[in-house]
Amino acid sequence: MNNKNPKRLMSITLMALSIVLFIMGAGMASLSTKYEDRMVGLGMIGAAALSYAEGAFIWSGAIKDDLNEVQIRKLNTDLDNIKKR
């Protein structure tokens, strides 16, 4: 792991916490007898999905930060060539 990029650590933490939240929400939604508790469990599953998506978005930003200037120029050139086709 690259310790120079704190975004990567933050995204890994968000993804790990969202997995725990998903498991807790699934347990609440399936094992509860009260309707309100089941809805809270489903809400926790939804929050976990949003948290995981946010972690993935931050991860993509961390990967972009890792690219150096030459690679970014090459990717832009390749993208321009694809657009011209």
Image: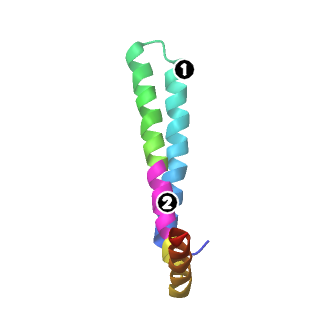
Quarter occupied by the N terminus = bottom right
Mark 2 burial class by Cα count in 10 Å: few <14, some 14-19, many 20+: many
Expressed as whole percent of the image width and height from the top left, the position of residue 19 reads 55, 43
Camera-side residue of 49 and 44: 49
Give the residue furthest to the bottom. 70
Q: CA distance from mark 2 to mark 1?
A: 28 Å
Q: Which residues are magenta?
A: 53-62
Above or below, comparing residue 29 to residue 46 in the picture: above
The residue that mark 1 highlights is 30
Camera-side residue of 49 and 73: 73
The residue that mark 2 highlights is 11
The type of residue carrying mark 1 is: Ser
Residue drawn at point x = 56 percent, y = 82 percent: 74
Q: Earlier in the sequence, mark 2 or mark 1?
A: 2
Quarter occupied by the C terminus = bottom right
Total label count? 2
* Disc sitting over residue 56 in the figure: none
Q: Secondary structure at mark 1?
A: helix
* Residue 34 highlighted magenta (yes or no): no
Residue drawn at point x = 50 percent, y = 23 percent: 29
The type of residue carrying mark 2 is: Ser
